[in-house]
Amino acid sequence: MPSIRYTPTPEPRNKHELRGEHPRRILQVVTGVNRYLDRPGHRTGLWLGELSHSWDVFMNAGFEQVIASPSGGAVPLEPKSIRFPNFDASTRAWYHDKEKMALLDDVASLEDVSAADFDAIFLTGGHAVMYDFPGCDALQRLIRDIYEAGGAVGSVCHGYCGLLETKLSDGSLLIAGKKLTGFSWVEEVLAGVAEIVPYNVEQSVKERGATYSKGLVPFISHTETDGRLVTGQNPASARAAAHKLVERIK
């Protein structure tokens, strides 16, 4: 398993020089929030399968991966992601692997991460990211800088909450005019959480000028690719979104 402990690369003379010197690297962004902030009794966190599925794809493609969160430190898990029927082979393999679980004990803070070290960024989900992805200046900086340097940006499920406030250097929103997908409002209703989520992210991306689409059947894999922006609708889309992100990087 490629090392993922983050060590900043010495400052290069330019970004193009750096990209020719290191193996392809992907920044996996996870949450640091463990509950619905206005509903303390409702636990949440990283949807583990979205990390494990994408990790497998990136690892098999030969990429190095670094895990980081807005706050750094320990990564909480969404309880539903490690229960039937979501506890699939990939998720179980990660959960029962002590070395992999240890990677979530103390991840890097996004504040300490340099965009120049990465060829792509991938935003995982879980309802927790609805709280700590928007408003995270370090995340917006990393997305912008990686994208403007020619890198790829990907998200799965609620990970697209991290794209809501990302502005390019010219002040325009990254997602304005872009085709994308992410966890739909219908899926929120069917999942029984429409009454406790802090906002309707599907509606929010539409209000910011994105062209949103979803699959005909809820909870089935669906992805969208618009140039170097790749998005997956739900947990079942993590593997497909990761494959498409690899294609954008190569």
Image: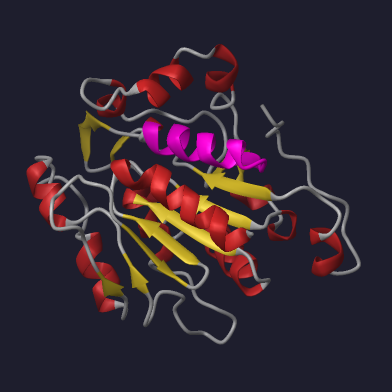
Please, is residue 182 above or below residue 125 in the view?
below
Q: How is the image coloured?
A: secondary structure
Q: Position of residue 167 (x, y in %)?
A: 50, 76
Q: Quadrant of residue 1?
A: top right
Q: Quadrant of residue 41?
A: top left
Which residue occupies 55% across, 58% down?
247
Q: Position of residue 140 (x, y in %)?
A: 53, 64
**Horizontally, is 81 left or right of 152 in the view?**
left
Please, is residue 14 above or below residue 62 in the view?
below
The magenta stretch is 49-67
Viewer-side residue, 143 vs 110: 143
Q: Position of residue 191 (x, y in %)?
A: 12, 40
Residue farthest along the bottom direction in this orientation = 170
58 in magenta: yes
Q: Quadrant of the C terminus?
A: bottom right
**Horizontally, is 52 left or right of 107 in the view?**
left
Q: Is residue 134 visible?
A: no
Q: Main secondary structure of the magenta part?
A: helix
Which residue occupies 48% across, 31% down?
75
Which residue occupies 25% across, 20% down?
83
Please, is residue 126 above or below residue 85 in the view?
below
Q: Is residue 203 visible?
A: yes
120 in magenta: no
Please, is residue 170 above or below residue 226 in the view?
below
Viewer-side residue, 80 vs 238: 238
Viewer-side residue, 42 vs 193: 193
Q: Position of residue 39 (x, y in %)?
A: 19, 38
